[in-house]
Amino acid sequence: MAKTYEEINERIRSGEAVVLTADEMTDLVRSEGAREAARKVDVVTTGTFGPMCSSGAFINFGHSDPPIKMSKVWLNDVQVCADVAAVDAFVGATAVSDTEGMSYGGAHVIQDFIDGKWIKLRATSRGTDCYPLKELETYVNLDTVNQAYLFNPRNAYQNYACATNGSKRTIYTYMGVLLPEFGNATYCSAGQLNPLLNDPYYRTIGIGTRVFLGGAAGYVAWPGTQHRPSAERAPGGTPVGPAGTLALIGDMKEMDSRWIRGARFHRYGVTLYMGVGIPIPVLDEEMAEFTGVADAQIFTNVFDYSQPTRSRDVIRRVDYAELRTGIIEINGSRVHTAPLSSYRVARDIAETLKDWIKAGRFLLTRPVEPLPSEGGVQALDVRGPEVV
Amino acid sequence: MAKKRLVLTFPPEVVERPIVALLVKHFDVLTNILRAEVHEGEIGRMLVELEGEGKRLKEGVNYLKDQGVTVEEAITDIELDESLCTSCGACTAVCTPRALKVEEPEWRLELDKDRCILCGFCVEACPLQLINVRF
């Protein structure tokens, strides 16, 4: 009954693999049960397309003549992190432009690179005997740079919170514009299509897993920052609110801005809309059960984002089927809900990955190491020098 | 006589008061409600054309502000660049008249201009900056 990675890959190579999107699998498990679904299906494809602030790109510009050890670097007037050797830099997605403020930033630089645009590079240095040049201004693009790859420290959050605003004024947050007096509520998860919600205990998604990243094949590099497997779990195993995360890596030269977009949240800042899809092997009945998860079985908590603290009160618990109706009830009133992540593009990603696998272009990988299955996040306490 | 096209936003506790009627009564300001989306207990939005003698019109607008109403200049049209829209849905969060919607089964952003009250709040809510206004 149980299948191995090797058997599934053999079926992919021979064009016989049965591949469903997570939406389709939910319907199949509902109608025929997990045992039958496990027998019929080899792979379930997932997808998510949402703002993932903890993203960025490493770029190697190549050496100028005379050479420069870049200590400060700007790309289209966005200052990036240059303290990695002479001509490597890391473009943080949330960096904002010196000249345009929040309407342009690191995430837009990343998208412009992927779109093949020329980018203005400005660098300064103190100058050394081996790197004498002190100032440089030139133009670069995806073809002129040696390497350009995303290294996103925290992507594909396994579930997220729902945000509302109980104060008397509009607030501008990374969860969008929140209208006063519970005027709306926003949520940000692909729910039953989300990768880690279809493998809640990380049985098949781990370090080394090949994934869809921005339209290219990428990899899980490491557990994501703030990976929090110890979150409270619903009966089916899915966490209630934010839990597991992934650090992802992939080649920008293979990406397409259909699946990765620079964005800004008004009066909050810049972020990167990132498209991620992960194939999940249906190894046995348990994996069929997991990948059959439905929005009504996935829960999250609603928080009042006008409370300026890291430990906000839970207003209520809600499931994604209810959030997707467009209206939830808060304190007896009807409140309109709005998504921030695109369900439409998430579905397109799952479909695209399905096509790649059916065409034999994308094989599954057994994780080199599993993700941690225990552990929480630490808070940052403000300490005095007496602790040293 | 002066004329102004304005978008009025009423907080929930103000929605229930007859503020617009009092505008006519106390300030001789003719009020033409072009579009309105007002429900008890929710934020209300209204596109209005106000007409009155210059000084009285100004006093009328100040009266609205004193009552807790947010007053903004109306725009004449919004334009959405659909070719680049990802249907994320962030703009729908601020669209209280429900002119912008993403819904099952397609989850594609739809703009119903007949419901739009031209408040322009979606312009700042769109993360991809794809919505523009014409004044």
Image: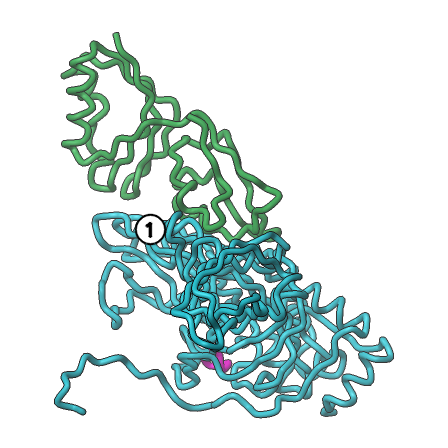
Colour of chain A as rendered: cyan
Q: Is the magenta stretch mostly helix, strand or loop?
A: loop
Q: Which residue is drawn at 46% across and 50% down?
A: B127
Q: Is mark 1 on a helix, strand or loop?
A: loop
Q: Position of residue B20 (x, y in %)?
A: 23, 24
Q: Which chain is in green here?
A: B
* Colouring style: by chain
Q: Is residue A131 visible?
A: yes
Q: Nearer the viewer, residue A233 or A211?
A: A211
Q: Residue at x 14, y 32 (%)?
A: B66
Q: Nearer the viewer, residue A281 or A215?
A: A215
Residue A188, image quadrant: bottom left
Q: Give the range drawn in magenta.
A: A234-238
Q: Position of residue A259 (x, y in %)?
A: 61, 59
Check the image and report above or below for B34 versus A349. Answer: above
Q: Which amino acid does label 1 sit on?
A: Arg
Query: Which residue in the structure is indicated by mark 1?
Result: A267
Check the image and report above or below for A245 versus B49. Answer: below
Q: Is residue A345 magenta?
A: no
Check the image and report above or below for A325 versus A352. Answer: above
Q: Residue at x 25, y 42 (%)?
A: B12
Check the image and report above or below for A17 versus B99. Answer: below
Q: Nearer the viewer, residue A29 or A355?
A: A355
Q: Where is residue A319 in the image (x, y as percent from the top left)?
A: 44, 66
Q: Residue at x 30, y 41 (%)?
A: B43
Q: Where is residue A200 in the image (x, y as percent from the top left)?
A: 52, 81
